[in-house]
């Protein structure tokens, strides 16, 4: 079942939505992702994790920094190691 609703969004959001062929599907996907994130946060809190917006922002910054350090050469080396491992030919190297 679907329900038609009208929403108001800031100009920058409206510009982004204008790029989508199916705005309804895009919005639904975004909201579902947010719902999944909320469920994950609830589950983590229930098992004892103390999550704060500041802590999550810091974790995001650290992840971005780590991703920025992945060079094409490092990515190629990792792919080669994975290929070796999948063939069962991996040799431990220092």
Image: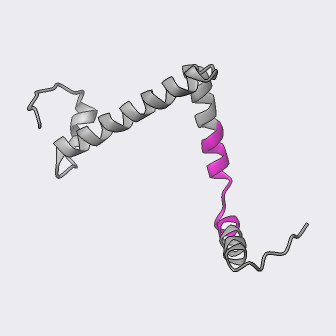
Q: Is residue 23 left or right of residue 31?
A: left
Colouring convention used in this rendered image of the protein? one colour
Residue 1 to residue 22: above or below? above
Residue 16 visible within the image:
no
Question: Could you tell me residue 59's position as x and y percent?
Answer: 63, 33
Instruction: Give the residue furthest to the front.
Output: 47
- Which residue in the rendered view is the most extreme toward the right? 94
Q: Residue at x 15, y 26 (%)?
A: 7
Where is residue 37? Give x, y as percent. Answer: 44, 32
Count how many numbered circles sit on residues in the image: 0
Magenta segment: does it hold 73? yes
Left or right, 32 with respect to 89, comes to: left
Placement of the N terminus among the 4 image quadrants: top left
Give the main secondary structure, helix, strand or loop, of the magenta stretch. Answer: helix
Q: Nearer the viewer, residue 58 or 18?
A: 58
Q: Position of residue 94 (x, y in %)?
A: 91, 66
């Amino acid at each position: 079942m679907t329900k038609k609703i009208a929403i108001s969004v800031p100009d920058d959001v409206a510009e982004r939505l204008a790029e989508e062929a199916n705005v309804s599907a895009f919005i639904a996907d975004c909201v579902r992702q947010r719902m999944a994130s909320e469920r994950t946060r609830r589950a983590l809190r229930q098992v004892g994790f103390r999550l704060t917006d500041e802590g999550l922002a810091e974790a995001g910054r650290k992840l971005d920094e780590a991703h920025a350090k992945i060079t094409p050469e490092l990515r190629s080396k990792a792919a080669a190691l994975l290929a070796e491992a999948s063939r069962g030919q991996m040799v431990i190297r220092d």
